[in-house]
Image: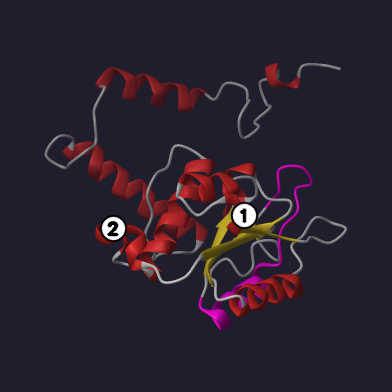
C-alpha cells in the first residue's frame, strides 16, 4: 500500500502534505514569537485575528456570530462543554459544585470522538454521566433515543444540559441529524454543540453544505 501521507496533494486533518502558504505563515509566527495574551502585547496580531475570524464567519454564513481560535478539535469540545456549563450555572466559576443542584448529564453519539468523554472526566462530571446515544446502521445518532434518554435521566432527578452532535464521525464519516437534535435541545433547554472537526469544511461549500450541515445554525 502506498504511503499517501507523502503525496503532495494529500490533505488529511492530521497528516498531510506540504502547503506552501501555511509554511510561510509558520515561518512568520515562529520569527515573530509573539504571545497574544493582551492587545498591549500584540496589537497587530490581535487585529489580524479579529479580521480573519470575521471573514471566516462571513464565508460560512455566520456574520453576526463570535469565534475564537483553538489548538484542535479535542480542546474545542472542551471549550463547548465549559461554555454550556457556565451558561446554565454562571455561578460555577466562583462557587464550583455548590452552584449546581443535581447531577449534570451530557449526551453524545456512541460513534463520537473519544475527546467528548474526556471532557466529562476532566471537568469532574464523570464518564458515567456522559450518556451514549445509540446510532443507526449508518452511524448517525437516533433522535428518538436521545429524547428517551433525556427523559429517563430527568425522572431520576438529574440535570441534562449538553448534547454533542457530530458532523463527520471519525470511523464512518457519519453526520448526525442536526435539525432534529436541535429541536430536542430547544424543547428541553439543552446546549447543542456540533463537533465538526472532520466535516465542518463543508460549510465552505455552497454545493455540499446542504443537507449535511443543515441545522448547525440553530
Residue tagged 1: 128
Q: Residue at x 68, y 27 (%)?
A: 10
Taking 190 as reference, is 77 above or below it?
Answer: above
Q: How many marks?
A: 2
Q: Is 207 on the left-hand or right-hand side of 106?
A: right
Answer whether residue 206 is visible to the viewer in this image: no
Q: Residue at x 71, y 48 (%)?
A: 169
Element type where label 1 sits in the image: helix
Report how far apart the C-alphas of labels 2 and 1 lie in the structure: 23 Å
State the residue in front, 192 or 25: 192
- The numbered dot on residue 93 is 2
Q: Which residues are magenta?
A: 168-189
Q: Quadrant of residue 214?
A: bottom right
* Sequence-first disc among 2 and 1: 2
State the residue in front, 15 or 107: 107
Taking 153 as reference, is 23 above or below it?
Answer: above
- The numbered dot on residue 168 is none
Split into 4 quadrants, where in the image is the C terminus?
A: bottom right
Answer whether residue 15 is visible to the viewer in this image: yes
Within 10 angstroms of label 2, few (less than 14), some, or many (20 or more) residues?
Answer: few
Taking 14 as reference, is 79 above or below it?
Answer: below
State the residue in front, 188 or 55: 188
Amino acid at each position: 500500500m502506498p504511503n499517501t501521507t507523502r503525496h503532495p496533494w494529500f490533505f488529511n486533518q492530521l497528516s498531510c502534505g506540504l502547503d506552501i502558504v501555511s509554511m510561510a505563515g509558520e515561518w512568520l509566527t515562529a520569527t515573530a514569537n509573539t504571545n497574544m495574551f493582551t492587545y498591549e502585547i500584540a496589537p497587530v496580531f490581535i487585529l489580524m485575528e479579529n479580521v480573519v475570524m470575521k471573514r471566516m464567519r462571513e464565508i460560512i454564513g455566520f456574520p453576526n456570530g463570535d469565534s475564537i481560535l483553538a489548538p484542535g478539535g479535542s480542546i474545542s469540545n472542551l471549550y463547548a462543554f465549559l461554555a454550556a456549563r457556565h451558561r446554565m450555572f454562571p455561578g460555577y466559576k466562583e462557587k464550583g459544585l455548590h452552584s449546581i443542584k443535581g447531577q449534570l448529564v451530557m449526551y453524545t453519539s456512541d460513534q463520537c470522538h473519544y475527546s467528548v468523554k474526556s471532557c466529562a472526566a476532566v471537568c469532574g462530571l464523570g464518564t458515567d454521566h456522559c450518556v451514549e446515544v445509540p446510532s443507526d446502521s449508518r452511524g448517525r445518532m437516533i433522535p428518538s433515543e436521545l429524547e428517551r434518554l433525556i427523559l429517563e435521566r430527568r425522572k431520576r432527578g438529574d440535570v441534562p444540559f449538553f448534547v454533542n452532535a457530530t458532523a463527520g464521525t471519525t470511523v464512518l464519516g457519519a453526520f448526525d441529524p442536526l435539525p432534529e437534535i436541535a429541536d430536542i435541545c430547544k424543547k428541553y433547554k439543552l446546549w447543542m454543540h456540533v463537533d465538526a472537526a472532520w466535516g465542518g469544511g463543508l460549510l465552505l461549500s455552497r454545493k455540499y453544505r446542504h443537507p449535511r450541515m443543515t441545522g448547525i445554525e440553530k
